[in-house]
Image (cartoon, rainbow, N blue to C red):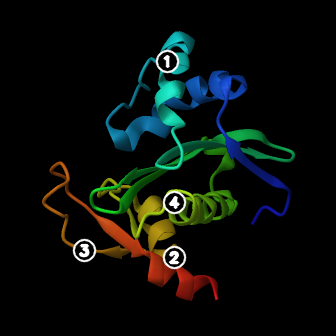
Amino acid sequence: MYTGTIDIRETSERDLINTMELWNNGDVMLYVGFPDGIGVTLEDLEKWLIWAINKPGRCHYSIYVEGIGYCGEAFYDVDTEHETAALDIKLLPNARGKGIAEKAFRFVIDKAFTVGTAESVYVDPHPDNLKAWALYEKIGFVSKPRPSYLEEGDTYMEFTREEWRKSIN
């Protein structure tokens, strides 16, 4: 377990080089279907950033850790019609297994509920990504049937605002 300072902040232009490294890393992107990375450019990310930070409904965060540097990203995107937020987290290989993902994901869940005003949050991990499944279950996500309003997918794990409140008290 890593005990240094973890800095989780809204992604800005200064973070885009790091985001590009993350997204172009095949190990990071393997379970989202891009085993060679996605080949994103800095120009692509400059355009993407305008979309990615649109609070209160959506926010992208960059994760930095003392002694390691840039570690990855976390994100929420609220569907206001269904009052639910899609969540995501990705870490570089050197940042995994240190408790960073748990702390960062708890942070983004809290932001989805407090800033994004979601009533529930969800993840849809790849069936073979066992480390992601373990993280989500540890935090309190529960597998449920996938709602019909979402795109087709193999998995769906949810955590409600009420369950979140109980877990932090």
Residue 78's spot in the image, x, y percent? 40, 53
Q: Secondary structure at mark 2?
A: helix
Closer to viewer: mark 3 or mark 1: 1
Q: Estimate the spatial distance between the alpha carbons at disc 3 and disc 1, rounded to whole Å.
A: 35 Å
Q: Secondary structure at mark 1?
A: helix
Q: Quadrant of residue 109?
A: bottom right
In the rendered structure, which disc, 4 or 2, sits on the residue that comes first in sequence?
4
Residue 130's spot in the image, x, y percent? 41, 62
Lateral position of residue 160 relative to residue 127, left or right = right
Q: Estimate the spatial distance between the alpha carbons at disc 2 and disc 3, rounded to whole Å.
A: 16 Å
Q: Give the residue pinned by disc 4.
A: 112
Residue 100's spot in the image, x, y percent? 68, 58
Q: Secondary structure at mark 4?
A: helix
Instruction: Residue 138: give its label.
Output: 2
Instruction: Residue 47: give its label.
Output: 1
Closer to viewer: mark 2 or mark 3: 3
- Could you tell me the amino acid type at mark 1? Lys
Residues tagged 2 and 3 counted as in contact (Cβ below 8 A): no
Instruction: Residue 144: give its label.
Output: 3
